[in-house]
Image (spheres, rainbow, N blue to C red):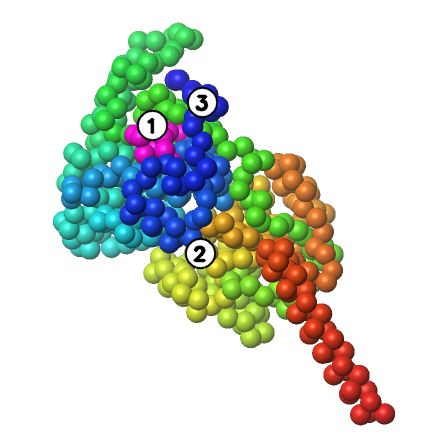
Amino acid sequence: MREDDEEQIPVYKTFEAMGLQQELLRGIFSHGFEKPSLIQRKAIKQIAQGKDVVAQAQSGSGKTATFSIGVLERINPKVKQIQVLILVPTRELADQVHRVISLLANYMTIRCIVSSGGQRKGGIINKELQKGAQVVVGTPGRILDLLKSGLSMDKLVSVVIDEADEMMNKGLKEQLFRIFKRIPSIASRQEKEEEEYSSLQTSNRYQFNHDKVSTSTQVIIVSATLSKACNELVERIASSPVRILVPRDELSLDAIHQCYIDVGEEKWKFEAVGDIFGAICVPQTVLFASSRTKVSWLSSKLMKEGFSVSSAHGEMDQAERDKVMEKFRSGQSRILVSTDVWARGIDIHTIALVVNYDLPENPSCYLHRIGRSGRFGRKGLAISLVAGPEDVQLLKEITAHFHIAISPAPKPLESLMDCLTTPEKADEIKKKRRKRKKKKDCQTEAKKQKIV
């Protein structure tokens, strides 16, 4: 496989410089984007030009918008058939990608539909397809069902495999390859590779020349890591892909201030949450816990304290989870208490604070969690609660994995509000804080004098 030198890939510092359609640019700017992230500067144009692309990027890097903008630029709105297929591992991620594409394409005559586990089959999806949907986002199982029922791929120009690493981990490999066999140009690549591999399986010099294969359908693979299984996927279906890497130390998490609070013992964690919510005022917060039982307990305790709370965990059925997400997304609740079921699937610009009530055991999960804040160019705050040696060790593993420093939260906690604002706004907040303190001191003094 040819691996392009990243230094040779043009870098576009603005969306305007990419030569995108005006209608798409309107969607980009109205969605809240001002300037492209590192991966967007490199990958959008490569995708828009129809090249196969392998992008290794973590949560918070802007990868969803990257492939969404790239494929939207390629669609012919006059053709009312499926032109883009986006495969994702979970229903939540399918919904997120569908929302992003729909918002970006708001000023374009392009229809996008979502088809994933948890939905009723047939009916609505078939009606949407008949109306001429050009983009389908879905989980492999549901897309296979659509293909079996006659979904045509004749006009397909792009296939996106998002979170390819998770696809492999979830055992979706066979479903993916069954889908690819129904896409003519990709199927031909697989067949040629299998023939070549069969004749050279005893050789250590196995190298298949993808340049000989038809490239009528573009392949875009996005993954947080490139495991052996992911690389095998790339080898089988991509043709001379451009590889774009966003290193861990260059992720767009600079906008997220990370700190921890050492509470000493588990029993003091809830009190620390109360202190955080009392000191930090943000539109919406996500509170992550390790189990369904703890999510339910936390939600109940917070509601008794008068907080507006929604809760979610993996044991809820899909209809319940959809209701919870809609309630939170509409702003009816300000706090979402969740297990890692939504560590990847929440894409709401009003989330400014993430609290890890329990630290995740997997460093990559930590990244996905805190990446729920600080999106769309906004600042975010992530606070982790630490209680005991096990939590201390988990925190050390996270900092070592990402080569970052996570400092203790400052006192008073109110000062963390400064991390969520511009320097000018921070000065304004400090002035208001001093004014409130002065007023409170005066009121306290007046009460003392009355008592005397």
Q: Name which residue lies at 44% across and 56% down.
A: 348
Does the magenta-highlighted stretch encompass residue 366?
A: no
| Rendered position, 397 above or below 280 | above
Q: Name which residue lies at 69% across and 74% down.
A: 436
From the viewer's perspective, tell me whether residue 34 is left or right of residue 125: right
Name the N-terminal-most of marks 1 and 2.
Answer: 1
- SS of the residue at dot 2? loop
Q: Amino acid at mark 1?
A: Asp
Q: Local crowd at mark 3 within 10 Å, few (<14), some, or many (≥20)? A: few
Does the magenta-highlighted stretch encompass residue 47?
A: yes
Residue 145, position as x, y percentages in the image: 22, 43
Q: Amino acid at mark 3?
A: Gln
Q: Which one is in front, 319 or 136?
A: 136
> Is residue 56 in sight in this rendering?
yes
| Rendered position, 81 above or below 342 | above
Q: CA distance from mark 3 to mark 2?
A: 35 Å
Magenta region: 44-54
- SS of the residue at dot 1? loop
Do the numbered discs 3 and 1 sit on residues whose CB atoms are within 8 Å?
Answer: no
Residue 353, position as x, y percentages in the image: 56, 57
Q: Name which residue lies at 37% across and 48% down.
A: 28
Q: Which one is in front, 395 or 85?
A: 85
From the viewer's perspective, tell me whether residue 145 is left or right of residue 101: left
Residue 201, position as x, y percentages in the image: 36, 11
Report the quarter where the N terminus lies.
top left
Residue matched to label 3 = 8
Residue matched to label 2 = 348
3 or 2: mark nearer the eye:
3
Residue matched to label 1 = 52
Residue 444, position as x, y percentages in the image: 77, 82
